[in-house]
């Protein structure tokens, strides 16, 4: 007998007499005796509270109690016959059209007669018969575990912060309704329903676990339609952060957990179903009481620790998922209409971006640079110092700066969605929109620079390590990925190339060339990418070489496995990573910038919830830096804050608004 076989175990019959059963639902001493049917099967007579219980948890026959007048059963129209037991108190019913049903019942109840001796050897090669007390304890313990597992699956929330004791002392409406349905169904449909319910409950539990992970990283639930592509991204992240072995072990662990949850929840539901059927009167009364209690608690709003006792959480959870799928399907049509509108689509090339002609324009994204880095009390003092030093050093080099806020469409991860939102002027909040965008003819900000014919457009994308066909959509004449920056140093966890080296490579490969045309560059700095350990540090620009110097620097860094054991360490390393990215950028401007340099830099999204500590905002800082006063005069009406740090009350726009505002400010009428 496996750990999750039915708890109703018939007694063993031997040549010397009957062995008392040791399992739940077995015939107790002093109860009714079993009688042979003509086919050789056993029909058990129930006693006590179970006298009228349906003991065919295997689905092959019901026992019924006589009426108050003691009448025995009569033939039924279907051919069923009823026979009185020897004492006349109870009756056993057998279907006339199923001659082997009784034998099947005996087999399903672990009753296996020994052909040679007539004795039976119940469960585990006779172990149950030799150790009845231990076997009964194991059976009861397994049943309790099955009940706890089903209760856990019904009540567990889909967010880590909501997992608390009060969440598991509630009455789930779905559990009460399911128990009533299983008790009401005929045997065969009941067995099928129990298995299907167990599998479905397991899948729902797995989805809740996945949601927990998504809320921890992206601060949103898993999208059943659009998020499957992120699984590949997640495995890549594991490989690059913890190595190939860590990736393989993590994937195997996830698969094993997935299978285990499905199997265990299915076996648990089947076991509890058999137990309820074997004790039908008690189960029916309990279900009725729980149903009444649920209605009462729901009506009165009874709560424990602020959590409602009566819950229909799974129904709401699944209902939200259905609506999420429907919304995703509708969103495709909505996005198509939005993408068709472009205020600059018919503008002649010679009237585009006239206010920036002759300038080198750099749009630079700092990974995970969110508002939390500036506003959080634990990070603010150090970040204030870095931003103030940057403002002052740039001013000393002749540069002025203005800063504001943008609202990103994502948080925690999904940088490419933020980048495409910023450049396209459309709200790219999911993978479906991203795919629609990158397969359309929508003009991005970089496309418009290229359309003028006045700029060479390049991309510095150290985070790209494979073919990136979307690069052509963004209108880039040339793309430098991690393999083409000349870097021969180590990865820093996910980050293939440190930011300082990326900026120096841009200078060497493009900006520093003589007799070149103006450049528009999209630069994506990756050092502040999760997991922020280990991180590089600033060194003398003359010592960068081919990047080999970073081997020694990496050894001096922290271990991500150790850092992520403590949320405060994670937050500290995050702050240091952002500081490094900002210093890499501002020092490059001081070192290589000139009268024709215009820098726009911004964060792409807020970091993961571990860092934001409950902050659900999606704001990121955005800054314009230029030496030419006329460049900043054109955005004076934006009312942005002077310096690299935006004031709390500085203007806040959606990231999708930037493209049109920028092109208007630097167009003929700007």
Image: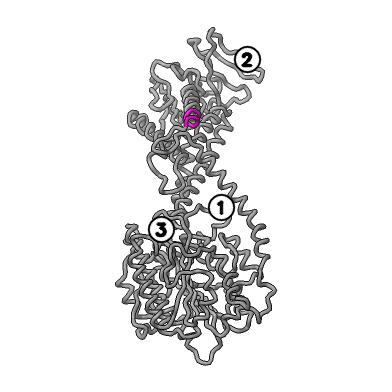
What residue is disc 2 on?
Answer: 75
Report the span colored magenta. Answer: 295-300
Residue under the image location 41 percent in, 31 percent down = 122
Callout 2 secondary element: loop
Image quadrant of residue 11? top left
Residue 296 shown in magenta: yes
Which is in the foreground here, disc 3 or disc 2?
3
Would you place residue 455 above or below residue 264 in this image?
Answer: below
* Frontmost residue, 582 versus 406: 406
Q: CA distance from mark 1 to mark 3?
A: 26 Å
Instruction: Name the spot of residue 156 as percent of width and height, x first.
Output: 44, 42
Q: Nearer the viewer, mark 1 or mark 2?
A: 1
Q: Nearer the viewer, mark 1 or mark 3?
A: 3
Q: Which quadrant of the figure contains the C terminus?
A: bottom right
Do the residues under discs 3 and 2 have CB atoms within 8 angstroms? no
Quarter residue 302 falls in: top left
Tell whether 285 sits left or right of 493.
right
Q: Alpha-carbon neighbours of circle 3 within 10 Å: few (<14), some, or many (≥20)?
A: some
């Amino acid at each position: 007998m496996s750990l999750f076989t039915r708890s109703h175990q018939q007694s063993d019959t031997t040549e010397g007499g009957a062995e008392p059963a040791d399992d739940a639902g077995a015939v107790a001493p002093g109860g009714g005796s079993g009688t042979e049917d003509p086919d050789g099967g056993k029909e058990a007579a129930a006693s006590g509270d179970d006298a009228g219980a349906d003991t065919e948890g295997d689905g092959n026959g019901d026992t019924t109690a006589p009426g108050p007048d003691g009448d025995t059963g009569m033939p039924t129209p279907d051919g069923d016959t009823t026979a009185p037991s020897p004492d006349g108190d109870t009756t056993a019913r057998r279907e006339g059209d199923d001659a082997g049903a009784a034998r099947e019942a005996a087999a399903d109840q672990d009753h296996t007669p020994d052909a040679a001796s007539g004795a039976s050897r119940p469960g585990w090669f006779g172990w149950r018969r030799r150790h009845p007390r231990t076997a009964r304890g194991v059976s009861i313990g397994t049943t309790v575990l099955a009940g706890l597992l089903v209760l856990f699956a019904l009540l567990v929330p889909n967010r880590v912060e909501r997992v608390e004791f009060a969440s598991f002392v509630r009455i789930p409406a779905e559990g009460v309704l399911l128990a009533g349905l299983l008790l009401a169904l005929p045997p065969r449909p009941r067995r099928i329903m129990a298995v299907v319910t167990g599998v479905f409950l397991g899948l729902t539990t797995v989805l809740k676990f996945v949601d927990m992970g998504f809320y921890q990283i992206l601060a949103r639930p898993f999208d059943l339609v659009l998020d499957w592509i992120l699984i590949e991204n997640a495995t890549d992240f594991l490989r690059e952060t913890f190595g190939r072995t860590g990736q393989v072990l993590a994937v195997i662990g996830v698969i094993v957990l997935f299978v285990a949850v499905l199997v265990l929840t299915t076996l648990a539901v089947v076991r509890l179903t058999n137990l309820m059927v074997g004790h039908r009167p008690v189960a029916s009364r309990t279900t009725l009481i729980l149903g009444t209690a649920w209605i009462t608690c729901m009506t009165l709003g009874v709560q424990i620790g602020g959590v409602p006792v009566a819950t229909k959480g799974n129904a709401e959870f699944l209902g939200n998922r259905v609506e999420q799928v429907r919304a995703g399907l509708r969103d495709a049509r909505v996005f198509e209409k939005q993408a068709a509108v472009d205020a600059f689509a018919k503008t002649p090339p010679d009237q585009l971006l006239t206010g920036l002609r002759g300038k080198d324009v750099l749009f630079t994204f700092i990974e995970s640079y969110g508002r939390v880095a500036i506003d959080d009390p634990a990070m603010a003092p150090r970040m204030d110092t870095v931003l103030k030093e940057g403002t002052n050093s740039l001013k000393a080099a002749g540069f002025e700066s203005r800063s504001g806020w943008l609202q990103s469409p994502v948080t925690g991860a999904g940088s490419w969605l933020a980048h495409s939102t910023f450049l396209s002027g459309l709200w790219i909040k999911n993978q479906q929109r991203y795919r629609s965008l990158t397969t359309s003819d929508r003009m991005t900000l970089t496309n418009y620079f290229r359309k003028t014919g006045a700029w060479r457009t390049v991309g510095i994308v150290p985070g790209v390590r494979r073919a990136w066909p979307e690069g052509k959509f963004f209108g880039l004449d040339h793309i430098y990925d991690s393999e083409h920056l000349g870097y021969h140093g180590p990865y820093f966890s996910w980050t293939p190339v440190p930011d300082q080296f990326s900026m120096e490579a841009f200078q060497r490969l493009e900006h520093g060339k003589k007799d070149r045309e103006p450049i528009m560059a999209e630069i994506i700095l990756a050092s502040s990418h999760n997991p922020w350990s280990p991180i590089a540090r600033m060194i003398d620009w003359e010592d960068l070489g081919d990047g080999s110097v970073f081997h020694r620097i990496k050894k001096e860094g922290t271990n991500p496995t150790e850092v992520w054991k403590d949320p405060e360490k994670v937050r500290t390393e995050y702050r240091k990573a952002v500081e490094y990215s900002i210093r890499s950028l501002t020092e490059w401007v001081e070192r290589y910038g000139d009268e024709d340099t215009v820098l726009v830099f911004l964060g792409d999204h807020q970091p993961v919830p571990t860092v934001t500590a409950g902050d659900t905002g999606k704001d990121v800082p955005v800054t314009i830096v230029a030496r030419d006063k006329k460049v900043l005069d054109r955005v004076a009406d934006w009312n942005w804050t002077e310096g690299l740090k935006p004031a709390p009350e500085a203007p806040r726009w959606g990231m999708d608004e930037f493209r049109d505002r920028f092109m208007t400010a630097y167009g003929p009428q700007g």
